Image: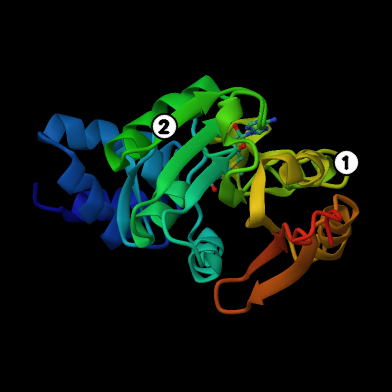
Amino acid sequence: MATNLAVVARLRAAGCVFAEDEARLLADAAGSPAELDALVERRVSGLPLEQVVGWAEFCGLRIFVDPGVFVPRRRSEFLVQTAVSLARRASPVIVDLCCGTGALGVAVAARLDDSELHAADIDPAAVACAKRNVEPAGGRVYQGDLFTPLPAALRGRVTILICNAPYVPSAEVGYLPAEARDHEPRAALDGGPDGLAVLGRVAAEAPRWLAPGGRLLVETSDLQAAAMRRAMTAAGLTARVRRCQEQGATVVTAAHLVIPNGLGLL
Ligand SMILES: C[S@@+](CC[C@H](N)C(=O)[O-])C[C@H]1O[C@@H](n2cnc3c(N)ncnc32)[C@H](O)[C@@H]1O
């Protein structure tokens, strides 16, 4: 449908900075003037644009986004780029924990040949949405707490373990933009007192799932990165902090290095 000036004006009045672009996307998503009106109404009421049109662009892919599911952030493309650059083996086994829509795992798998993709989330709405994105890419999606729902056969086989978990400290959730606070689940945002409650558990259990030489990659805030690196080191992993100024992103990576003669972990 053609964009119209009245829609642009409504969006602008509601505070949408990129009103023309949004009007075009909403018009493309609508099948009739009445549907366009309903979509604009949802947008001006504060829903994230991606939940209104039903998709987000991420790493050049169109990812389905359902209402109530965390919208993948563009800064997380840095985690995807880093994962791809660290993937040295043929036929990687990728696990995307706390997958939300599954955008990150799908994007990593799309860039690596002959990959095996598994994704998991605790939230049924996220799992249903992830199935729409991950299964057409040949992957599988599970529901449950962190590693719990994964098939036991994955233990010791995972070459790339990515996890963009909730990492906002509980006391700071109230300062997030209203779009996130009001339309993304609290469990997708709140990382506990220091923001690292979920990620700390991931680091502790990761060595049991990673293949020798396998990598764990997580996104954190800049301030949390040193504590996250310490948590990974305490779990027996060799960790490093990587930052991307341009995307405003911080990713902490860790390698599961095993001494060949079986003496144990470095
Ligand atoms: C910040 S969102 C990120 C979603 C996705 N990784 C992304 O970057 O678009 C965090 C996700 O973690 C999930 N989550 C929170 N606690 C979890 C847990 N204990 N086990 C599994 N998933 C969890 C939430 O349901 C939410 O989908």
User: Relative to residue 232, is residue 84 depicted above or below?
Assistant: below
Q: Is mark 2 within 8 Å of ligand 1?
A: no
Residue 49 vs residue 229, the one in the foreground: 229
User: Is residue 192 visible in this depiction of the protein?
Assistant: yes
Residue 233: quadrant of the picture = bottom right
Residue 65 vs residue 202, the one in the foreground: 202
Residue 123: quadrant of the picture = top right
The residue identified by callout 1 is: 193
The residue most toward the bottom is 245
Res. 140 mark: 2
Q: Position of residue 28 (x, y in %)?
A: 16, 47
Res. 235 mark: none
Mark earlier in primary sequence (2, 1): 2
Q: Quadrant of the C terminus?
A: bottom right
Left or right: 251 as drawn, with respect to 172? left
Pointer 2: residues within 10 angstroms few (<14), some, or many (20+)? some
User: Is residue 46 visible in this depiction of the protein?
Assistant: no
What type is the residue that disc 1 sits on? Pro
For the image, the number of numbered tags is 2
Image quarter for ligand 1 equals top right
Q: For the point 89% across and 59% down, which residue is it?
A: 230
Q: Position of residue 90 (x, y in %)?
A: 43, 60
Label 2 and label 1: CA atoms lie apart by 32 Å
Q: Position of residue 165 (x, y in %)?
A: 66, 43
Left or right: 238 as drawn, with respect to 153? right
Q: Is mark 1 within 8 Å of ligand 1?
A: no
Disc 1 element: loop
Residue 122 vs residue 53, the one in the foreground: 122
